Amino acid sequence: MSSPTPLPTEVGVQSKTHLDQILVAAVLEHAPFRIYFKDLESRFIAVGRQKLLRHGLTDHREIVGKSDADYSTPEEARRTRTDEEYIMRTGTALLNQEEKTVRPDGQVDWGLSNKLPLRDESGAIIGTFGYTEDITQEREMGDSLKGIQGALVDASRMAGMAEVATGVLHNVGNVLNSLNVSTSIITSGLRQSKAASLAKLGQLLREHAADLGPFLTEDPKGKKVPEFLESLAQHFNAERERLLKEVEAMLKNVDHIKEIVSMQQTYATMAGMVEPLEAAALMEDAVRMNSGTLGRNQIKITKDFKPVPAIMAEKGKVLQILVNLIRNSKHACDETGRADKELTLRVTPGEPGRVLLIVQDNGIGIPPENLMKIFRHGFTTKAKGHGFGIHSSANAAREMKGSLSVQSDGPGQGATFTLDLPLATAARPTPASPV
């Protein structure tokens, strides 16, 4: 933004009016909200750039003298007019209101609006003014999450796989935590917005309406008004960019939830079917279902997938086991507090006719006395754990004629879980997945 034009030492009526126009024009042009001013008949007398763009206009003369009835549905226009009549009658502002609008093409928008009384120099109400922040994306995020959660519940019910659903819901919950953080940041940013400073500036200028020229050119506070407006515009732009980044992060997390749900649905349709499977591909799917929390906790993942024949197993049950093992290893790494957290995943030949799927971590380790207890139903060392995951994983392995074992050298030495599964009959070796 260019520097404001220097003001003359002596300000007359003409230059004062010119300065008022400069100040108002700066706010209307650069504020990232849909700003408007209306008369007593709810007709527009001035609007900001974003308000013009909202209606596909480029020149303020196209909208001045018109009302919401020219751009909104009859119901929305009546609602807006009712609000403005209330404000003009009572002098009470209507703040932080969520409003739904329907465009002529049927598209639905949501806005967070603030409506206030417009007063003249004597304090008499001569209309209304306000500003609206577009929150359509935030609302769509909420609707999308509800749809995803519903799809997840339906998929789990269809499959009848309580163990897999528990693992999936846990991982979706982790991603939802990230979404909640982003939502809190966006909400906090909107609530702490400096938009209220515009109203304070308007009040300050009204207080000096009689001596506005000298106030802006001689008073220390008045001299700072142009600089303040420029700073405010820069702040609004920076705030907008920051909130957009959070929205982008939310979209990525929603996409991750969709991927988890999609994989769960794929496995659910294969429930109860034992077939030849590629071990490395199953390991990759389990990693993707945990990727949100693994990445957020900065855990290094090392993959060592050897070429092995196909295994004979049930997709859903293998996924259940691997998701549980990776999740537990992630928790074990987090509890150490160390910076070099690492998870190693291996696929390697086992005894003749067997393949080993290994999950190894450098976490808190397991005391010797707990190595034999860890597969018991209800045994857990976590304050909020239920002891079900590892126990059900061991049962699932046995149902597929396999086994699940654990090895640890003690506290602080990490742990290694090994899933041993049988080969498919007359199976050929399959290529290793990329490391």
Image (tube, rainbow, N blue to C red):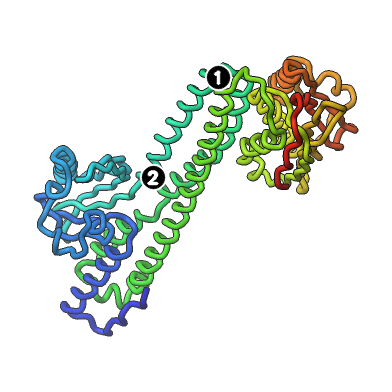
Dot 2, how many residues are within 10 Å of its Cα: few (below 14), some (14-19), or many (20+)?
some
- Helix, strand or loop at label 1? It is helix
Using the image as rendered, state which of residue 289 and residue 116 is in the foreground.
289
Residue furthest to the front: 426
Name the residue at 41% across, 48% down.
190
Q: Quadrant of residue 106?
A: top left
Dot 1, how many residues are within 10 Å of its Cα: few (below 14), some (14-19), or many (20+)?
many
Using the image as rendered, state which of residue 383 and residue 158 is in the foreground.
158
Q: Position of residue 169 (x, y in %)?
A: 57, 27
Q: Is residue 287 left or right of residue 184?
A: right
Say above or below: 342 vs 148: below
Q: Looking at the image, can residue 115 be seen?
A: yes
Q: For residue 159, which numbered disc appears in the image?
A: 1
Q: Position of residue 327 (x, y in %)?
A: 69, 33
Q: Is residue 68 left or right of residue 202?
A: left
The CA span between labels 2 and 1 is: 33 Å
Q: Position of residue 92 (x, y in %)?
A: 22, 43
Using the image as rendered, state which of residue 120 and residue 83 is in the foreground.
83
Say above or below: 192 vs 358: below
**In the image, which is nearer the foreground, mark 2 or mark 1?**
1
Figure quadrant of the N terminus: bottom left
Name the residue at 75% across, 43% down.
303
Mark positioned earlier in the residue sequence (2 or 1) = 2
Q: For residue 137, which numbered disc appears in the image?
A: 2
Name the residue at 80% across, 31% down.
356
Using the image as rendered, state which of residue 183 and residue 17 is in the foreground.
183
Name the residue at 18% across, 43% down.
80
Q: Looking at the image, can residue 90 be seen?
A: no
Q: Quadrant of residue 296?
A: top right
Q: For residue 329, which numbered disc appears in the image?
A: none
Q: Position of residue 151 (x, y in %)?
A: 47, 27
